[in-house]
Amino acid sequence: MDKIEWDVSLDRSVYLLEIDDLLFPKRDYLLQVYYLFANFVEFTEGRELSKSMVDFMKSVYEERGEVAVLSETFDHFNLSDSYKENFERLQANAHLPLKLFIPEKTKAFLQTLSTSKKQIGILTDGNPVEQLNKLKHLDWQELHPLLSSMKVFFLKELQFRNIEALDFLAETYQVEKDDICIIHQL
């Protein structure tokens, strides 16, 4: 499984892309989740805090990363642990107020793959429910015709079923393993 840059030659038959930070910036999804969560807490608690909570969560995300956001937010706003389940459910199933957009560089790459008659799919390592939800909110724009031929694979699901991902993908696409290029990040 090769990790490649965008200026790669098109010498493979199958190209599989991760969702986060390739099809759209993961940050765009998370900030909307933070907004929805802050509004939920404000409504539930009956106290004005959504704007300050969103600002705080964004700041923590940008300074210390996604992993730190939840615990620091709960500490800073003195939130009950009972909200954790709400946050996790929201992160996986959020109905986003705004669409997610594919970066121009990614669009151009996908168009090049398509015109070169390459098979394109998605191989993602996140929570399957959350990753499908992200795809649901993605605005494919002029790439919409690609959707009918794209397959989505979940690494966690394959691992759970004790299936070796590369063997499974080669069989699914009916190609040799060396004919598959998996792109994890830009």
Image: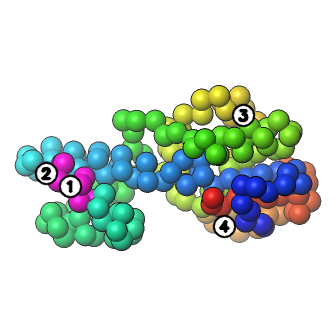
Residue visible at 78% across and 41% down? Answer: 112
Circle 1 residue = 53
Few, some or many C-alpha atoms within 10 Å of disc 1 (few <14, some 14-19, many ≥20)? Answer: many
Q: Mark 4 or mark 1: name the one nearer the start of the chain.
A: 1
Q: Which residue is mark 3?
A: 146
Number of the front mark, 3 or 4: 3
Q: Give me the disc on residue 49.
A: 2
> How many residues crowd mark 4 within 10 Å: few (<14), some (14–19), many (20+)?
few
Image depth: mark 4 or mark 1 in front: 1
- Residue stretch rendered in magenta on the structure: 49-57
- Callout 4 amino acid: Gln
What residue is shown with label 4?
A: 159
Residue 140 vertical placement versus 39 (above, below): above
Which image quarter holds the N terminus?
bottom right
Magenta run includes residue 138: no
Mark 2 vs 1: CB contact within 8 A: yes
Who comes first in sequence, dot 2 or dot 4?
Answer: 2
Q: CA distance from mark 2 to mark 4?
A: 41 Å
